[in-house]
């Protein structure tokens, strides 16, 4: 089905509630609906299996306009349908859609706290990312909330997490974090255990919240590029790429083919470094430190390549608005090819290790299994979803940039356990290496940058990029000035957390670190939009039910 | 199912040279494109300030002493710089660049991270001017 047909189908599905149709871009359809109709409209799309809910963007249209907007973005291949709900600034209420689409909980809690859009029917009332004692009726992402106000805000940052210790006869709450030797980044988990079995899981993030989205609203387009590069220290290039792509779409600037090829190349190298890093961490959590050390040693190869090409190991700053900074000449091309040859043999070796090593398989095979329907229901993304057999990869579904010319093939596994997640990631690397070679062999000639205007024409756009952890979603709005009006970022880790919490329940406490590592969490990147998640928000399982589930699981 | 799948890797490493370096006596050579400290050549500068405009961390300030005589001093706050290279990219006259030799950052106090680039007499003159009305151009 073509994009146009998909959008037409969506329009027909939404016809009963449609108040106004807007086509902001060729691949996008905005349907304005009344807040009361939201639930029905969302279920219409959901029931017809029209794509998946990718993000909910909150927006403040300003004090004079007196209006807030909530945009529910559904993605289906390259086609994006957004349900646009217009709300008054005072007393904005939308119904929850988390009962039909569980991952919406995170997004809804975000707009609730940041924009003061009340979500009717939301099961959890605790704060999601603001401190517990944040004053009510202060919404940090509204336009009239200034940085000065934030500075003056007196909050004690006292979190009300459950007290550790014995809670029932045989049950204990085991708190982990926010500062904990086993956690590489700050996060708080509390696992209720009955003996060794986890019966409830809860988490709170937000310890690394930096308010980046708000900060963009006072910086120029170019300055923001570097700010977004710093959302994540592992996939910095993907963030910068997604932002540049969005800005270029708004400015209607065609990025030269050579620049696009180099972007894909750097993204490929970044994926290799990210997945090898992940492999090491997972191996370490499983107690397989040999694999951890060797995979990290080999990761140095790709880090050195990145440094050699771009000039830095972490924030490569390879992108500029309108193109790239770094040229790939013969010398670089030769170095990359040599590096890839070495890496490919190593990746094949690791693939063999993770699928045959008896000790490691004990910790991965059949553990944390997520079936395909579950993965769909939780709204998982990236390799975590692909390991369960869900074909979700923006590079293939909606090819962008150079992925049109140098496509990658889809890698999926069916088992959905930790082993499958290892296999998917490693196989994906081999695919990436193959694509990088074809780029190097057929590098298009031409300039590296196109001229970008300083003022970006007014408009709204969506840029989606496949980061190593899954789909990265950027929503960018300009009013024609030198600074953006609103940039909304939804990082893939945010959608994948649910897999940990759902899967920890009923498992041994010792499996939990592996489950956390299995989704390749990135705290800092979702801390921009921080989350507190109660594993049972969607269903509200009673403790009794959880316990039964745990017992049943183990007697199977 | 196998045991000791990584045994050969370990064995092979026994016969490899140690990779730990005796820094600072031994240093890894940095690649040519490495982005270390910013350098600036006032001779080519026109004072257009394009470099200052896009610096995401407000790490550089250009002080014009005499535009016609091309007397400029660049105040570089090394500790604020994020080494992105945007300033060097913006400069049309190639007066700026990121050094791949000069990258080691350690100092006992913060002042050492504020560097003045320019002709010696210009820097002196500027510093004298600053010391008269107390630190006027400092930290906007
Ligand atoms: S490298 Fe970047 S942060 Fe440093 S001075 Fe230049 S523009 Fe500013
Ligand atoms: S952009 Fe170049 S010429 Fe212009 S002020 Fe900066 S260093 Fe001087």
Image (tube, coloured by chain):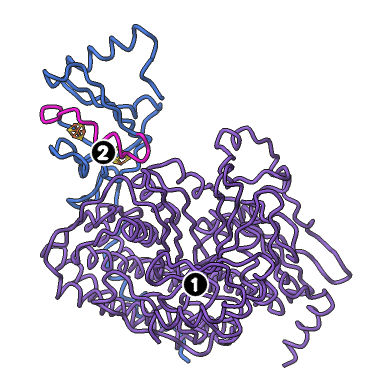
Q: Residue at x 12, y 63 (%)?
A: A446
Residue A396 in the image: x percent, y percent? 36, 79
Residue A11 in the image: x percent, y percent? 51, 78
Q: Secondary structure at mark 2?
A: loop
Crowding at dot 1, Cα within 10 Å, few <14 / some 14-19 / many 20+, comes out as many
Label 1 close to label 2 by CB (< 8 Å): no
Q: Nearer the viewer, mark 1 or mark 2?
A: 1
Residue A302 in the image: x percent, y percent? 29, 65
Q: Which chain gets the purple colouring?
A: A
Q: Residue at x 19, y 22 (%)?
A: B72
Of B139 and A447, nearer the camera is A447
For chain B, what colour was chosen? blue
Residue A337: image quadrant is bottom left
Q: CA distance from mark 1 to mark 2?
A: 46 Å
- The answer to if B48 sits in the magenta stretch is yes
Q: Which residue is mark 1?
A: A81
Residue A253: image quadrant is bottom left
Residue A15: image quadrant is bottom right
Q: Is residue A532 above or below residue A214?
A: below
Magenta-colored span:
B42-58
Within 8 Å of ligand 1, the CB of disc 1? no
Q: Secondary structure at mark 1?
A: strand
Q: Is residue A525 above or below residue A211?
A: below
- The answer to if B129 sits in the magenta stretch is no
Crowding at dot 2, Cα within 10 Å, few <14 / some 14-19 / many 20+, comes out as many
Q: Are marks 1 and 2 on the same chain?
A: no
Q: Is residue B7 visible?
A: no
Q: Is residue A8 above or below residue B34?
A: below
Query: A334 left or right of A469?
Result: left
Q: Chain of mark 1?
A: A
Residue A142 in the image: x percent, y percent? 59, 46
Q: Which residue is mark 2?
A: B37
């Amino acid at each position: 089905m073509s994009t146009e047909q998909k959008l037409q189908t969506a329009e027909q599905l939404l016809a009963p509630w449609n108040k106004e149709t807007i086509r902001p871009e060729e691949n996008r359809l905005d349907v304005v609906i009344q807040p009361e109709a939201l639930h029905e409209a969302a279920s219409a799309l959901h029931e017809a299996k029209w794509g998946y809910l990718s993000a909910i963007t909150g927006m403040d249209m300003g004090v004079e306009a007196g209006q807030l907007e909530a945009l529910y973005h559904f993605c289906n291949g390259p086609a994006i349908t957004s349900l646009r709900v217009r709300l008054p600034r005072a007393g904005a209420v939308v119904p929850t859609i988390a009962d039909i689409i569980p991952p919406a909980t995170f997004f809804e809690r975000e707009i609730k706290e940041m924009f003061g859009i009340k979500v009717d029917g939301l099961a959890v009332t605790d704060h999601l990312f603001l401190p517990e004692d944040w004053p009510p009726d202060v919404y940090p992402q509204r336009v009239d909330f200034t940085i000065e106000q934030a500075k003056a805000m007196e909050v004690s940052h006292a979190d009300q997490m459950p007290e550790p210790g014995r809670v029932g006869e045989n049950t204990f709450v085991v708190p982990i974090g926010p500062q904990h030797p086993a956690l590489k980044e700050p996060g708080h988990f509390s696992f209720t255990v009955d003996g060794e079995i986890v019966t409830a899981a809860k988490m709170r993030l937000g310890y690394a919240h930096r308010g980046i989205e708000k900060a963009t609203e006072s910086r120029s387009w170019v300055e923001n590029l570097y700010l977004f590069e710093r959302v994540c220290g592992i996939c910095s290039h993907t963030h910068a790429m997604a932002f540049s792509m969005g800005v270029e779409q708004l400015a209607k600037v065609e990025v030269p083919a050579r620049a696009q090829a180099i972007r894909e190349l750097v993204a490929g190298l970044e994926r290799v470094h990210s997945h090898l890093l992940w492999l090491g961490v997972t191996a370490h959590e499983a107690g397989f430190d040999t694999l951890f050390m060797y995979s990290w040693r080999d990761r140095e190869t790709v880090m050195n390549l990145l440094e050699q090409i771009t000039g830095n190991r972490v924030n490569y700053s390879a992108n500029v608005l309108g193109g790239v900074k770094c040229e790939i000449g013969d010398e670089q091309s030769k170095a990359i090819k040599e590096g890839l040859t070495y890496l490919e043999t190593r990746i094949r070796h690791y693939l063999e290790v993770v699928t045959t090593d008896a000790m490691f398989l004990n910790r991965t095979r059949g553990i944390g299994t997520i079936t395909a329907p579950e993965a769909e229901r939780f709204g998982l993304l990236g390799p975590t979803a692909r390991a369960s057999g869900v074909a979700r990869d923006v590079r293939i579904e909606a090819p962008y940039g150079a992925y049109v010319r140098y496509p990658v093939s889809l890698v999926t596994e069916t088992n959905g356990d930790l082993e499958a997640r290892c296999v998917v990631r490693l196989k994906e690397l081999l695919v990436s290496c193959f694509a990088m070679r074809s780029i190097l062999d057929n590098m298009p000639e031409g300039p590296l940058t196109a001229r970008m205007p300083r003022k970006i024409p007014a408009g709204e756009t969506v840029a989606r990029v496949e980061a190593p952890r899954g789909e990265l979603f950027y929503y960018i709005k300009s009013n024609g000035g030198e600074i953006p009006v609103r940039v909304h970022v939804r990082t893939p880790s945010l959608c994948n957390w649910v897999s940990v919490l759902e899967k920890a329940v009923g498992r041994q406490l010792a499996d939990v670190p592996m489950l956390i590592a299995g989704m390749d969490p990135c705290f800092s990147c979702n801390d921009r939009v921080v989350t507190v998640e109660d594993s049972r928000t969607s269903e509200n399982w009673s403790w009794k039910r959880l316990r039964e589930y745990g017992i049943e699981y183990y007697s199977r | 199912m196998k045991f000791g799948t990584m045994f050969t890797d370990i064995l092979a490493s026994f016969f490899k040279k140690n990779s730990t370096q005796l820094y600072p006596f031994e240093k890894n050579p940095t690649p040519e494109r490495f982005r270390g400290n910013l350098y600036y050549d006032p001779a080519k500068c026109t004072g257009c300030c394009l470099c200052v405009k896009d610096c995401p961390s407000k790490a550089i300030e250009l002080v014009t002493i005499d535009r016609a005589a091309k007397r400029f001093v660049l105040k570089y706050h090394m500790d604020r710089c994020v080494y992105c290279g945007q300033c060097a990219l913006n400069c049309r006259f190639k007066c700026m660049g990121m050094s791949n030799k000069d990258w080691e950052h350690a100092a006992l106090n913060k002042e050492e991270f504020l560097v003045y680039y320019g002709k010696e007499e210009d820097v002196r003159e500027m510093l004298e001017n600053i010391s008269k009305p107390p630190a006027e151009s400092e930290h906007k």
